[in-house]
Amino acid sequence: MNKQLQMTTKRLQTQYKLDVIGIGDTYQRQNFKKWKEIENDWENGKQYFSTCHIRIHVQPQITQSGSTLPK
C-alpha cells in the first residue's frame, strides 16, 4: 500500500503537476502564514508541489473483521 501511494504521488508531482490529493490544503491549515507566501506558486510559477518532498507513512487499522460465507 505504501509503495502504491508513493508511486501515485510521484506521478501526480511529475507527470500531472496537480495537487488533487489536497496536500496544499493540509499545509495551509498547519502553516497559514507561510502558505500565503507560496500559494500562487504551489502548482504554478515555481511549482512547489512538483518539487516538494512528500513522506508517506501508512498504518492500516482493522476496525471490524468480516466473515466469509460457506460455499
Image (cartoon, grey):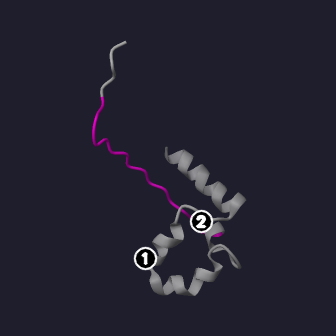
Magenta span covers which residues? 51-66
Query: Which mark, by number, is residue 19?
Result: 2
- Is 55 on the left or on the right of 17, as rendered? left
> Quick one: SS at disc 2?
loop
Q: For marks 2 and 1, give the CA distance.
A: 15 Å
Q: Nearer the viewer, residue 65 or 31?
A: 65
- The amino acid marked with disc number 1 is Arg
Circle 2 crowding by C-alpha within 10 Å: few under 14, some 14–19, many from 20: some
Residue bearing the label numbered 1: 29
Magenta stretch, main secondary structure, is loop
- Is 62 on the left or on the right of 50, as rendered? left
- The amino acid marked with disc number 2 is Asp
Q: Nearer the viewer, residue 23 or 71?
A: 71
Residue displayed at 64% across by 68% down: 51
Where's residue 11, x and y in %? 66, 55
Vertical position of residue 67 compared to residue 8: above or below? above
Q: Quadrant of residue 60?
A: top left
